[in-house]
Amino acid sequence: MENKDKKNEYQEYITEKLKKTERKQDVNEEWINIKNVILEAAKEEIGEQRKERNQDWYDEECQLQLKKKIMLERNV
């Protein structure tokens, strides 16, 4: 149920913002406006998620092996 509510809020936000946005004659400028509204709505209604890269498997051992590999490649 919560996802459906979020979806509706997201759609309503976009609809209301687009109604208030000045229309442009140039298709590229219009696309930029639409894109910005969509991105703003996503950030407001859904939020940002931080991606934690390599946290599960990239540890000190991986880092050490990578340094060894780089040193070997430089010496070849």
Image: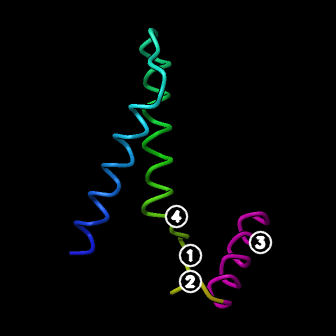
Residues marked 1 and 2 touching at CB (< 8 Å): yes
Question: Does residue 20 lie above or below 60 as drawn?
Answer: above
Residues marked 2 and 4 touching at CB (< 8 Å): no
Q: How far across and how far down the image is residue 74, in percent? A: 77, 63
Residue occupied by mark 4: 48
Residue occupied by mark 2: 55
Question: Does residue 59 lie above or below 16 as drawn?
Answer: below
Residues marked 1 and 3 touching at CB (< 8 Å): no
Magenta range: 60-76
Residue occupied by mark 1: 52
Q: How is the image coloured?
A: rainbow
Marks 3 and 4, how far apart at CA? 38 Å
Q: Earlier in the sequence, mark 1 or mark 3?
A: 1
Q: Earlier in the sequence, mark 2 or mark 4?
A: 4
Instruction: Report whether 55 appears left or right of 37.
Output: right
Amino acid at dot 1: Glu
Residue occupied by mark 3: 71
Which of the 4 image quadrants contains residue 1? bottom left
Marks 1 and 3, how far apart at CA? 27 Å
Q: Earlier in the sequence, mark 2 or mark 3?
A: 2
Q: How far across and how far down the image is residue 40, in percent? A: 50, 47
